[in-house]
Image (cartoon, grey):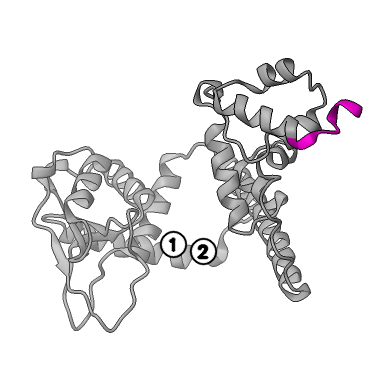
Amino acid sequence: MSKYTDFEGLRAQAVTLRREGLSRRQIRDRLHVHNNDILNRLLEGETPPEWTKRPNAKDDLRARARELRLQGMTYDQIQVELGCSKSSISLWVRDLPAPQRRPPSEQARLAGRKRWEHELAVRDIERQETKQTARAEIGSMTARELFLVGVGLYWAEGGKDKPYDRREKVQFVNSDPGMVTTFLAWLRLLEVDPDLLCFSVMIHESADVGSAERYWADHIGIEIDQLFKTTLKRHNPKTTRKNTGEGYRGCLVIRVRQSAELYRRIEGWWCGIVGAAPEADHWNRT
């Protein structure tokens, strides 16, 4: 350590060389300082020359890590946010002040939230696995199975005749693309003339009407100008709607012209299902 006794004099030389544009290695070799800790102290506070700053793929990550550290994040939190190692984070932010320790109650709350987020992720995986298993159980459908599904689907979601309001016509309104696809497949099974089908969109006036019209036209395979006039639902400022955002596309309305006879048959089919259901052989499933 004898050669470092005149530390201030050595530092002055190191600072002068740094400001002349020399790199750490050049200063080390010029002053014969091969101890990194001593060299760090000699150059403390001095900005490296631009030519020594090489482009690095992690520069953006480093800058982001420093920003998050200044916001008070711990190494673990920065690691979760950026997906990089804690050793790298430590190198990037070690000159920054450590965040203040949170009160025990807040730490417990954050830990609880982290455990709950993990639990939600596990539940989501289980949920998706259950759905995939159930989907595989369906397999292919026979024409009779599609026929029965379609009758039930229409009677649950389609327009119905009332004694006080005669509406013997087939009309189906739904926001679920899968329901629409199934209903149209059922109409094809019944050999309904495609020329008798009329399509239109029903949507809130504050939504993106044009985008919804394009979506539904693409979904059912027609040109957008084949859609009938869109029905706009008035927005009630006293209510809070949750069906908003990019995923909201309103409903597709499907009407079958000259369909009074078809409607009567649908109602009859449904009554037949209701009558037969209690006596169904639940064990004879193939």
Snapshot quadrant of residue 162: bottom left
The quadrant of the rendering that contains the C terminus is top right
Q: Is residue 47 left or right of residue 261?
A: right
Residue placed under numbered mark 1 in the picture: 273
The main secondary structure of the magenta stretch is helix
Image coordinates for residue 125, horizontal then vertical, percent? 65, 48
Tell me if 38 is positioned left or right of 216 in this view: right
Could you tell me how far apart the alpha carbons at marks 1 and 2 are, in whole angstroms? 6 Å
Whether residue 4 appears in magenta in the rendering, the answer is yes
Picture coordinates of residue 56 (x, y %)?
A: 55, 25
Query: Please, what is the three-letter code of the amino acid marked with disc 2?
Result: Ala
Q: Secondary structure at mark 2?
A: helix
* Relative image position of residue 126 (x, y in whole percent): 67, 51
Image coordinates of residue 171 in percent, x first then y, are: 21, 60
Residue under the image location 81 percent in, 33 percent down: 6
Task: Verify CB contact (< 8 Å) between mark 1 and mark 2.
Answer: yes
**Image-quadrant location for residue 256:** bottom left
Q: Is residue 102 above or below residue 60?
A: below
Q: Is 232 within the magenta?
A: no
Which residue was labeled with disc 2? 277
- Between 171 and 101, the one nearer to me in the picture: 101
Q: SS of the residue at dot 1? A: helix
Q: How many marks?
A: 2
Q: Nearer the viewer, residue 191 or 131?
A: 131
Quarter-of-image position of residue 105: bottom right
Q: Please report the bounds of the magenta region as a residue range.
A: 1-8
Q: Amino acid at mark 1?
A: Ile
| Residue drawn at point x = 70 percent, y = 66 percent | 110
- In the displayed structure, 22 sits above or below 88; it is above
The residue sitting at the right extreme is 2
